[in-house]
Image (cartoon, rainbow, N blue to C red):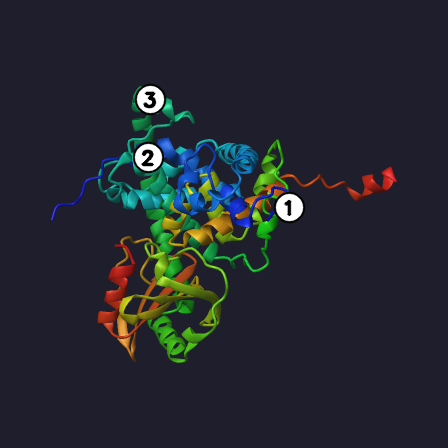
Amino acid sequence: MHPKHNLSSDAILAIEVCRPDSDDALLAEVASILESEPPARVAELRRSVQRVDRAIMAATQKLPVPEGLADRILANLPTSPIGPATYVAVPEASADAVEIASREQRPGRRARRRWSLVAGVGLSMAAGLLVAATLWTSRGSVEVAEVQAEARTLYQDDDHRAPLASGEFPTLLPGLAANAIRGWREATFLNRDGVAYELSGRRRVQGTLYVVALRSFWGPKLNDLPLRPVPHGTAGVTVAVWADDSNAYVMVVRGGEHDFWSFFSRNVAA
Amino acid sequence: MTERMPTVDIGQLVAEHHASVYRYAFRLTGAVCDAEDLTQQTFLAAHVNLAQLRQAEHARGWLFTILRHNYAKFRSKRLPLSASGFDVDLDAVAEEVPTELVVDPERLQQAIDELPDDFKIVVLMFYFEECSYREIAERLGLPAGTVMSRLARAKARLRAKLTEPDEIPVSLAARAE
């Protein structure tokens, strides 16, 4: 019993998780706790908690947005395969967006044509630089086969049986179902720091997802969604790899490719 | 097989939601440049996967989900803030609920920044996305009890930080004596 509010700890927890001006108190978990508490005391604490919640809710939404952000976002989007972006500069008040958009459409188109020209020249230069950078840095890069080999070695060394850390973490591979993650721990992969997520699927399929700080790894790009893994199975495990600008994502599933696809199709959204 | 055509235009999506996506990104990262990067990445992923968005009225939640995924990726590049040192006694959760609260924006962000990610995501889904604890549990794939406990603790920590008395600079305190 809480000495100040004369309510049980469970009741206080239940009051805390209700949103202001909502029916959350009717949700089963909350309702079953609060029904045995004195209504007046519940109402009193609920009023003060929700008064504070309203203030914090309003404050989290109150934040200036950098000028020209929407323009920068659109300028950085690739040309759409489904038609050009039709956005024109719109002020913060989104209710007026449609009207203002139609008024400013012509100047917006001219600006986009100018931008296309500049972007074309810029892209050509960037492509040249990228080729040069590729040739320069490829000596130090990590090969897919090296990553696969390390993943197999770690798995066969029973690395996946290491104790897990406490606390749960959000899904790190786009589309990976949170309930496929059994836990996580810190890991060392190719002498780099990383995090290992232990995975488990139906029919006792098990595996590990390594997320490793590995800038020099040029595997299949993670942002090429939907993820199309190219699993490589040998020595009792199947490995698929992806990379983004900073990390390698290595999924190891115990068993052959059939087991890998079985896990992947059930737990990773296409 | 015919490709599903999106019913929402990316330009419209950016116009209507860039501000809220940016604000959410800022609350998660606590830095303007990181928030801009996350916002950009979110709309990039939205652009690529636009066909998945079937109804325009779900756009906000869909973008926030992409944002949370991108934030998880962003955090994976840094060492995660461990939740092991974060402990709030549940009995102390409602100890000090102020009758009125004027929220200092800087202090609010500082308090959010100090939360471990597990708690930060839950409390921002509550305050920013205005999700119920049950919706949070469903979206994160967590038991409702886990979410309730994290939410109550995180809220208590935020309140405590927001109502902390101002620190008096040492020199002023010494002069007062």
In this view, A100 is above or below B170: above
- Frontmost residue, A25 versus A129: A25
Q: Amino acid at mark 3?
A: Glu
Dividing the image into 4 quarters, which one contains the C terminus of chain B? top right
Which residue carries the number 3 mark? A104
- Labels 1, 2: front one: 1
Q: Report the Cα–Cα distance between label 2 and label 3.
A: 17 Å
- Frontmost residue, A15 versus B111: A15
Task: Check whether the beta carbons of the residues at disc 3 and disc 1 lie within 8 A of each other.
Answer: no
- Frontmost residue, A237 versus B124: B124
Residue A3: assigned label? 1
Q: Amino acid at mark 1?
A: Pro
Badge 3 element: loop
Q: Residues within 10 Å of mark 2 (few under 14, many from 20)?
A: many
The answer to whether tags 3 and 1 share a subunit is yes
In x, y percent, where is residue B163? 65, 39
Task: Check whether the beta carbons of the residues at disc 2 and disc 3 lie within 8 A of each other.
Answer: no
